[in-house]
Image (spheres, rainbow, N blue to C red):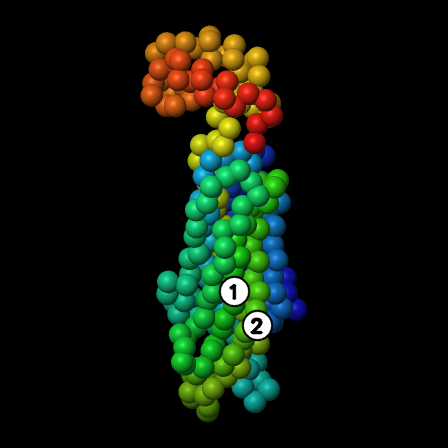
Amino acid sequence: MASCFVSAAASAGADVGSWSVDFSTTGQPISWTSPDGVRTDGQTYDVRFEIESIGVVVSYIGIEFGPIDVTDQLGGDAVQQASADGPCPIDFGGSSVREPAAPEPVTIAFDVQLQVDEQGRATYDMTNVVLGTATYNIGFPFGNVTVDLEEVSILGQFDVEVIGTSCAADIDGSGVVGVDDLLALIGDWGLCPACATDLNLDGIVGVDDLLELIGAWGTCG
């Protein structure tokens, strides 16, 4: 059995998305998509998924124990993060988690894929899930025994940050670089730090910005 719950804090077209995600699996793959998204026209996208807690249910001679908190055993595998150029969709590639490291017998292993789709929604895929064995003290009268992992529950935080825009010349955000953008640029001509029309970010709206806008004329992205 696999289940997934999510709570979200992001607005449509936002520069930052942050979601709390709760996964549970007995070995099946997990596929999750955020309920809302970030803007899709970014220049750079930074993603970070952090496992905040992980609990397991184990069994010994048919008797189940748990859930048992094993968060402290993840180490560096608790965080997956990546950065890639926009616009969306973006595939950040995959990574693998295995505890403990080979050649020790596997306790838990899975592959992770992080993406942002064409609508700016974050996606998390956990595949090739392996629930193995571990040595655990289950108390009197058994003590330290080899147990089988039956279920894993993961509470995580998925964050996406959008930096810049892949089409800065689309000043009004219409999806097209045109007359309205040109008029906005002319209206800001001269010293204009922090202006959206300062396309090259030199603090001045001038000829260089005009040439960049003309070069991007038409449908943007």
Place residue 139 in its image quadrant. Answer: bottom left
Task: Check disc 1 and report its element: helix, strand or loop.
Answer: strand
Q: Where is residue 208 in the image (x, y as percent from the top left)?
A: 39, 17
Q: Where is residue 66 in the image (x, y as percent from the top left)?
A: 52, 75
Q: Position of residue 8 (x, y in %)?
A: 56, 45
Place residue 70 in its image quadrant. Answer: bottom left
Q: In this view, does 33 lie above or below 131?
A: above
Left of 13 or right of it: where is 95?
left
User: Can residue 197 be seen from the camera position used here?
Assistant: no
User: Can residue 164 be seen from the camera position used here?
Assistant: yes
Residue extending farthest bottom: 141
Residue drawn at x 46%, y 45% is 84
Q: Is residue 195 above or below residue 5?
A: above
Residue 72's label in the rendered image is none
Q: Is residue 72 above or below residue 218?
A: below
Left of 148 or right of it: where is 205?
left
Q: Position of residue 99 (x, y in %)?
A: 43, 72
Residue drawn at x 37%, y 9% is 190
Q: What residue type is labelled 2?
A: Glu
Q: Which amino acid does label 1 sit on?
A: Asp
Whole-number angstrom distance, CA of label 1 to CA of label 2 = 17 Å
Q: Mark 2 points at which residue?
A: 151
Among numbered discs 1 and 2, the one appearing first in the sequence? 1
Residue drawn at x 39%, y 13% is 206
Left of 174 or right of it: where is 15?
left
Q: In which quarter of the image is the N terminus?
A: bottom right
Residue extending farthest right: 1
Residue 111's label in the rendered image is 1
Task: Check disc 2 and report its element: helix, strand or loop.
Answer: strand
- Closer to us: 208 or 154: 208
- Closer to us: 50 or 104: 104
Q: Is residue 192 above or below residue 61?
A: above
